Each structure stands twice: as structure tokens, then as C-alpha cells.
Image (tube, helix red, strand yellow):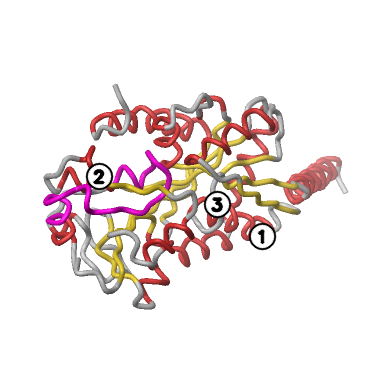
Amino acid sequence: MTQFRKGLWRSAIAAAAMAGFVTSAAAQMELKIMAPAAPGGGWDQTARSMQQALTQSGIAKSVQVTNVPGAGGSIGIAQLVNNSKGDGNQLMVMGYVMVGALLTNKSPVTLDQTTPIARLTTEYEAIVVPADSPIKNAKDLAAAIKADPAKVTWAGGSAGGVDHIAAALFAKAAGADPTKINYIPFSGGGEALAAILGGKVTAGISGYGEFESQVKAGKLRLIGLTSATKTPNVDVPSIKEQGVDLEIANWRAVVAPPGISADQKKALTEAMDKLAQSKEWQEILKAKGWENAYISGDAFTKILADEQARTKEVLTAVGLVKS
């Protein structure tokens, strides 16, 4: 064997060993994912779906999910920032809900104190009513809320989150005063669903995935989604197509604690990159009806900053945050 071939051989062996080391290192990750809400909601579903895909694909050796409910994620983010500083194995699921909730709750802890990692998904909001409700479509609901916004009760996620914003924007589009809506926040999707099914509220609002099984079972009536046009596999026109000018999408992402090293951030980002590309994750997205909106690195950091500024403007406009 010539010296040149020997050199190539050694390089190939070294490259293979390094690739094996990287794969092995990723597989040795023992991750912790916090869902800053009660079980059953979108953040909890996202965290447990990540757990399933990360372990089944071999990207991580183990993934532990914990729930820290309360105040639209304000309690969870405070715990992440104050108790997990420098922990390179910790992630927290968050999203548009948290951006608004931190503003309305006047949280002393902000997203600027976390380490942004990646945006994962987007999902349109769904508005539902109990199956026996006299409200049949978006126009019926718009007429009811225009007549008396306080009489129409909404069940959704935390105050100031995307559910609350969407309800306020629906009222505004219907010609009602968005500051007068009767919105009842719940810390978990399971609690909100029970209130809707029990007829304790007029309507419910959340991601479609949280209502889909009950809609298909005939227990809830889907009024529509907050997409621009009808969504595939959903046999109801969008809210906008029904004449109510409302279009809004939720998104979910993961952040890490403050104080992690550049190498720790890189390892977490690479794990999320692999997650987004895995067939296990793609299958979950399809099953849940979540849109793939993956973006990481500096691009996600910029999006997060822009969303905080935009959300403050919207919340101020509909009276949920004082200017």
C-alpha cells in the first residue's frame, strides 16, 4: 500500500471514528424537558412527543418530562431561569402563549433571560362549541358576541396567550369591544376541555389537535380554524371564509436555561436539528396535524425578539396590556 493510500485509509478511519463519537455522544444525552403547564395541553403534548421521538430515534439516551403549571408558563420560566442556570441538559417548551402571558402577568422573568434553541411547529387555532349548542357557525358566534360580549364565555389557555388574543380579535372582527370579552383561562387543556364538554362555557378555543378526537366523536362542533383558507382534512370553512376577518397561528418552541456554554448550546441545537429531520418526528407532526416550522440558531433568536415586540402591540391594541 502506498504512503498516499495509507494516508487516505488513516483519514477515513479517523473520520469514521469521529462520526461514531458524535453519534455516540448525541445518543448519550440525558435530556430533561419542562412543560410549563398542566398535562393535556399543547405544551405537554409537545414535550411528550419530543420525548417519544428523541428516544425512539436514538438521538437521546433518555428524556424526562416534568410539568410545572401556572400563569401561562410564568412559574415554569421562573424555575428555569432561577434554578437551572448552566444546565446543558435542560429544555423548556414554550410558544406564542408564553410571549403574551408574560406581558399580561407582568412577569419579572422574561424570555430574554433564556437561551433560545429552536422553533418546532405552528398550529392554527380552532373554535368549538358543545354539540348541542344553538351556535352553528362563525356568523352565529359573531352575532352573539356583538349583541353582548360579556354573555359569551370562552374557555382557553392562560390569560394573554394566543387563545385569549384570538378570542379578543374575534370579538373585534365581529364589531364588539374586545376589552369586554368574558374569557376564562385554564392552565391545562384537559380542564378547558371538561368545561366545554360540560356546557359551562359558550365556546372553547385552542389548537385543533386538542379538540380533534371530540369533534370526530360528535361531542363538539367545530366552528372553524383561524387559517386564511380551509385546511386539508378539516371539513369546515375557515373563520375568515365565513366572513369574520380573523387569521392567527400559534407556534411552539424550545429554550434552554441561561448560563449554558457555547458547546452545550451547540449540542442542544444539533439534537433539535436531528429531531426535526427524524422520521419519528415527521410521523408525529402528521398524526397531530402540526405544521413543521423548524428554525434554529440566530434566525430563531431574531424571530423570538420580533414576536415579543409584535405581541405587545396586539395586546395593547385589544386592551389586554396597558400602554
Establish if 163 lies above or below 128: above
Q: Which residue occupies 36% across, 44% down?
A: 162
Amino acid residing under circle 2: Ile
Tell me the tag on residue 57: 1
Residue 94 placement (x, y as % from top left): 51, 42
Specify start and end residues of the magenta stretch as a single range. 142-166
Tell me the tag on residue 181: 2
Residue 8 seen in the figure: no
Q: Name, please, the residue furthest toward the bottom.
A: 217
Residue 265 seen in the figure: yes
Is 212 included in the stretch rendered in magenta? no
Amino acid residing under circle 3: Ala
Disc 2 on helix, strand or loop? loop
Q: Kindly report which numbered mark, 1 or 3, lies closer to the viewer in this rendering.
A: 3
Q: Quadrant of residue 36?
A: top right
Q: Which residue occupies 38% across, 33% down?
A: 307
Estimate how packed mark 2 is, as few (under 14), some (14 to 19) or many (20 or more) residues with alpha carbons within 10 Å: many
Q: Name the residue under label 3.
A: 38
Q: Which of the marked residues, 2 or 1, is nearer the chain's N terminus?
A: 1
Residue 187 placement (x, y as % from top left): 48, 49
Q: Which of the marked residues, 1 or 3, is nearer the chain's N terminus?
A: 3
Q: Which of the marked residues, 2 or 3, is nearer the chain's N terminus?
A: 3
Establish if 187 lies above or below 197: above
Residue 273 placement (x, y as % from top left): 58, 46
Q: Are marks 2 and 3 in contact (CB under 8 Å)?
A: no
User: How far apart are labels 1 and 3 at the CA level?
Assistant: 26 Å
Q: Which residue occupies 75% across, 51% down?
A: 27
Establish if 112 lies above or below 57: above
Estimate how packed mark 3 is, as few (under 14), some (14 to 19) or many (20 or more) residues with alpha carbons within 10 Å: many
